Amino acid sequence: MKTKDELPDCPVATTVSLIGSKWKLLIIRNLLTRPWRFNELKKDLDGISQKVLTDSLRSMEEDGIVTRTVYAEVPPRVEYALSELGESLRPILDAMLEWGNAYKGAV
């Protein structure tokens, strides 16, 4: 997790720095429904590269938004899920969904 000194003073800028990329928001959108495996996310997020998905998941894991669980199976299974902190983003994404639908209805 970043320290307070590493984060912007503005709370909105802090939020944007943590989840503001297109791909991070779409990953979070998916993880709000259930835990996902890496390849499932890659297939569902049309156009994302393996590198960007890996970097985004690692970044969000470091920031405490995503958890990574490795299951001791053969072959190994890894699942990504939202942490409790990540789950707290649900109202933000719900508001984005509502606004997006309203915008679509207005144009």
Image (tube, rainbow, N blue to C red):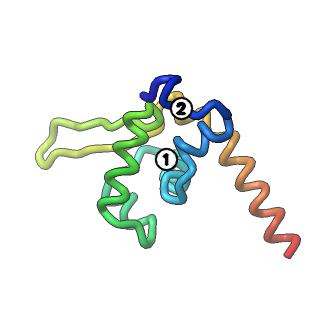
Q: Position of residue 15 (x, y in %)?
A: 61, 39
Q: Is residue 97 above or below residue 65?
A: below
Q: Position of residue 8 (x, y in %)?
A: 58, 34
Quadrant including the C terminus: bottom right
Q: Position of residue 28 (x, y in %)?
A: 52, 48
Task: Estimate how packed mark 1 is, as few (under 14), some (14 to 19) or many (20 or more) residues with alpha carbons within 10 Å.
Answer: many
Tell me what residue is drawn at x 34 percent, y 51 percent.
55
- Which amino acid type is shown beneath numbered disc 2? Leu
In-image side of 14 versus 92 (left or right): left
Tell me what residue is drawn at x 39 percent, y 42 percent.
59
Question: Which of these two is toward me, 27 or 19?
Answer: 19
Q: Tell me whether circle 1 and circle 2 mark residues in contact (CB < 8 Å).
A: no
Tell me what residue is drawn at x 16 percent, y 45 percent.
76
Where does label 2 land, which residue?
Answer: 7
Question: Which of these two is toward me, 20 or 74?
Answer: 20
Tell me what residue is drawn at x 43 percent, y 41 percent.
60
Where does label 1 land, which residue?
Answer: 31
Marks 1, 2: nearer the viewer: 2
Q: For numbered disc 2, what is the local secondary structure?
A: loop
- Which amino acid type is shown beneath numbered disc 1? Leu
Quadrant including the N terminus: top left
